[in-house]
Image (cartoon, rainbow, N blue to C red):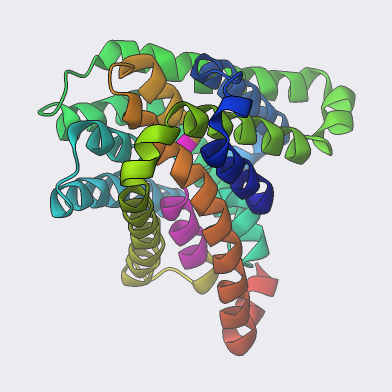
Amino acid sequence: MAVIILIAAVLSFVFPGTTGCIRTSWITPLLGCVMFGMGLTLDFRDFVVVFSHPKDVLAGFICQFTIMPLAAMALCRLFSLPPELAVGVILVGCCPGGTSSNVITYLSKGDVALSVGMTGVSTLAAPIMTPLLVRLLAGTIVPVDFWGMFLSIVNVIVVPVAAGLAVKRFFRKFADAVVEYLPAFSTTVITLIVVAVVSANAPQLRTCGLLVMLVVILHNLLGYVLGFMAGKLLGMSEPKRKAVSIEVGMQNSGLACSLASSHFSAMAMATVPGAVFSVWHNISGALLARLYNRRTIAGEPELKEYKNQ
């Protein structure tokens, strides 16, 4: 997935005219399709972890909506980002966990149940938490329509996920039949979102692309490191620390692109940090999974703990 998205992003940057037919207005419906697919992969039993391990999920939830928003604000000030880029970075930081975080947690031998629980809770809380945090952090930069953003997130996240869950519940055979095709489908859709944003902003990227990449990479790495450290400070086991680290570091950057295009259309570059994050966090997630795997193999007690879970 990372390789496909990276190639598409480079081609869109170098030859924006050939991919310009994919419009930024497509972002919201495309993301809705991805979230519907996410709902198909979930099950109501996946939320049992919220009640069986409420402290872990609550801790992860707090980390999710404090570390990345505050890191985004700190980076914006450190690099004195122009308003439209700052809004984009803050949007990424205030979004819920990424849709591929559960797979990366699995590959990292992390606590998948906790990862799924955190993704579900942060996604369902996003209609309130995301516009609230964006208003608090970016309200001094640009007017933020809280209720408009609330309704956008409900329509593009909550409704499709709920529809996917309903289909999984009442049409299980159909859901089981299509689930194996969802990774390819999601990769295609996310690639189209990245292509739309990069091709639309290719001229601007030529002037500030390196700065955006630097900020996005630092933002993502801060999420991984601070998420892991927070889990350690809270006395979590190794698999749980990995899950929190990955959930905090990997954001639903597609949602950031959708919100930027819908609510900050006058700021064309506001969609760019989300698109760059979509490319980068899939690359960094794969690399982190290899690093965490080596850490687990090297530490025999953690390996036994993971197997017992």
**Which of the 4 image quadrants contains residue 290?**
bottom right
Q: Position of residue 292 (x, y in %)?
A: 56, 73
Determine the residue positioned at 57% across, 45% down: 10
Compared to residue 284, the image places residue 44 above or below, namely: above
Question: Which quadrant of the figure has residue 162?
Answer: top right
Q: Residue at x 68, y 47 (%)?
A: 4
291 relative position to 234: left or right? right
The part of the image, by quadrant, that contains residue 225 is bottom left
Return the x and y of residue 36 as percentages of the image width and height: 65, 24
Q: Residue at x 57, y 36 (%)?
A: 12
Q: Nearer the viewer, residue 76 or 165?
A: 76
Is residue 87 shown left or right of residue 42? left
Does 118 appear above or below 225? Answer: above
Residue at 38%, 52% (x, y): give it.
Answer: 213
Across and down, in percent, residue 246 comes to 49, 57
Q: Which residues are magenta?
A: 240-253
| 241 falls in the magenta region | yes
* Res. 19 in view: yes
Q: Nearer the viewer, residue 64 or 185?
A: 185
Q: Is there any visible trace of residue 50 in the rendered image?
A: no
